[in-house]
Amino acid sequence: MDFHLPSLVTVFTLFLLFGVSLNVGRARGKYKIEAPATTGHPKFELAYRVQMNTVESSVAFLPALWLFAWYVSATWAGVLGAIWLAGRLWYAFAYCEDAKKRGGGFGLSILAFATLAIGAFVAIIRQMV
């Protein structure tokens, strides 16, 4: 099986995680929020929430991506993973602008995640029975 696409999605997910971490560091400096504080200027708090939400989402996304790739299709895992990434980027940029604008990106990423997780679950059960 060719796992190049889910592998690329995994690398881009790492880049996304690194990017949102850098953004929090930038916001710390810009708004003078000293570590370990996680509150202060509202724009810093938005950047921090984007980072935490992205970490939380990635923890569930990555296993779903790889289980789907293994049990269903590596190609479709890559496509769905790219959709998840697009949703998370949309979410991150929208959330940093205004938390109320995060819905579209969240919806797209949760749809891709649900497809990966449910698809992997169904395929695993089918192979077991």
Image (cartoon, helix red, strand yellow):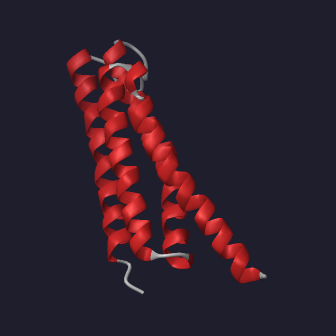
Residue 38 in the image, given as x and y percentages of width and height: 43, 23
Left or right? Give the position of 25 relative to 109.
left
Number of numbered discs present? 0
Q: Position of residue 99 (x, y in %)?
A: 40, 21
| Quarter in which the C terminus is drawn | bottom right
Position of 30 compared to 88: left or right? left
Question: Looking at the image, is 68 positioned above or below residue 59?
Answer: below
Depth check: give the residue in front, 41 or 80: 80
Residue located at (30% from left, 67% from top) = 8
Report whether 67 appears left or right of 46. Answer: right
Measured from the top left, where is residue 45 in percent x and y? 39, 21
Say which of 32 and 59 sits in front: 59
**42, 105: nearer the viewer:** 105
| Residue farthest to the bottom, as pictured | 1
Q: Quadrant of residue 19 in the image?
A: top left
Please identify the residue farthest to the top as the structure is shown: 41
Seen from the viewer's position, the closer of residues 51 and 77 is 77
Answer with the quarter of the image where residue 80 lies: bottom left
Task: Tell me the residue at 41%/33% (across/down).
Answer: 104
The structure residue drawn at horizontal position 32% and vertical position 28%, both measured from the top left corner, is 94
Q: Which residue is located at x 57 percent, y 77 percent? A: 71
Q: Position of residue 76 (x, y in %)?
A: 43, 69
Picture quarter with the N terminus: bottom left
